[in-house]
Each structure stands twice: as structure tokens, then as C-alpha cells.
Image: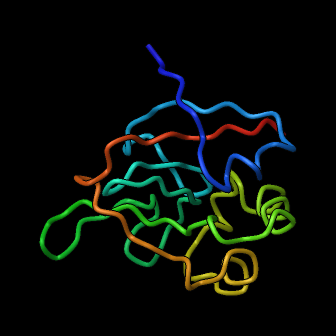
Amino acid sequence: MVQRREITGDLQGYLGQFKYSARETSYLGVKPGDLIQISYEGGNRQGLVVSSKRTSSGLFLSSKLNPLLNVVLVESISGGMFSLMVNNLYKNRDACNYFSPNIIGAFLGKENFRTFNISKIRDLLTIDIPK
């Protein structure tokens, strides 16, 4: 059964202009271009899953064999940039590559790139925005 959870923080405000749904999922079910919210080390983080040189799926193993997830955070972008991101990057598997600096950097800023240790993620929500 799919559990419904609440979106928090700035993401909740950004999504106000869209019809959306959120559902709990496994990290194995996310792909580049997916908008997610995770509970991580006591707080919620929101971002867009991206691929990189190490992985085409956004998931990879570190040198210490920790499973990691590539995410570009959307927590500090403006509402206008969020709309542009939804229209150009959301669900776009090809464009959501960390090593496309002209794309990711222009929309979300390369400084917002993070890798999250899967073992520290408590809840993972994917946000579906019908186009």
C-alpha cells in the first residue's frame, strides 16, 4: 500500500502552483529527473536526482561500499527557477546529468550537488507533477 506523506519547507510553497502528488518509495525506484524529498539525519531535504560520470541511474557505491544517491538540492532556488526546472529538467533523464554544467549549473547551481548515504535516509518521497 502506498503511504501519503506531507511535503515540507520551501518545496511545499514551490509546488503550490502545480497539481502534484507525493508517494513514499524505495531508493531503488528513483531515476535522474525525479523530484524527491528525503528525511536525512534529522531533517528533510528536497532535490532532483541526477546522474554523473559514476552512474547513469543516480545511485552508486562509494569506495567504502556505501550506497549513495546523487541529488541537486532545490531548497535554495527561487520560485521562478523552480518553475523553469520543472519545465526543463523534471523527468528529463538526459538533461539531469551532473556533468552537464550548462544545464544543471544554470538552473540549480553546481554548489547544490550532494551525495546522500542511502543507509541514513529514513523516508523517501517522490513528487509527481503531471505535465
Q: Is residue 69 left or right of residue 103?
A: left
- Judged from this view, the residue extending furthest toward the top is 1
The residue that appears at 69% across and 46% down in the rendered structure is 12
- Residue 121 in the image, given as x and y percentages of width and height: 32, 50
Q: Is residue 21 left or right of residue 52?
A: right
Q: Is residue 1 left or right of residue 37?
A: left
Q: Nearer the viewer, residue 79 or 71?
A: 79
Residue 22 against residue 96 in the figure, above or below: above
Which quadrant of the figure has residue 82? bottom right
In this figure, which colouring scheme has been used for the structure? rainbow
The residue that appears at 38% across and 40% down in the rendered structure is 123
Q: Quadrant of the N terminus?
A: top left
The residue that appears at 68% across and 75% down in the rendered structure is 108
Which quadrant of the figure has residue 118? bottom left
The residue that appears at 45% across and 58% down in the rendered structure is 57
Residue 81 against residue 11 in the figure, above or below: below
Q: Is residue 20 left or right of residue 58?
A: right
Q: Quadrant of the C terminus?
A: top right
- Residue 113 in the image, given as x and y percentages of width and height: 51, 76
- Residue 83 in the image, given as x and y percentages of width and height: 84, 59
- Residue 51 in the image, given as x and y percentages of width and height: 50, 67
- The tally of labels here is 0
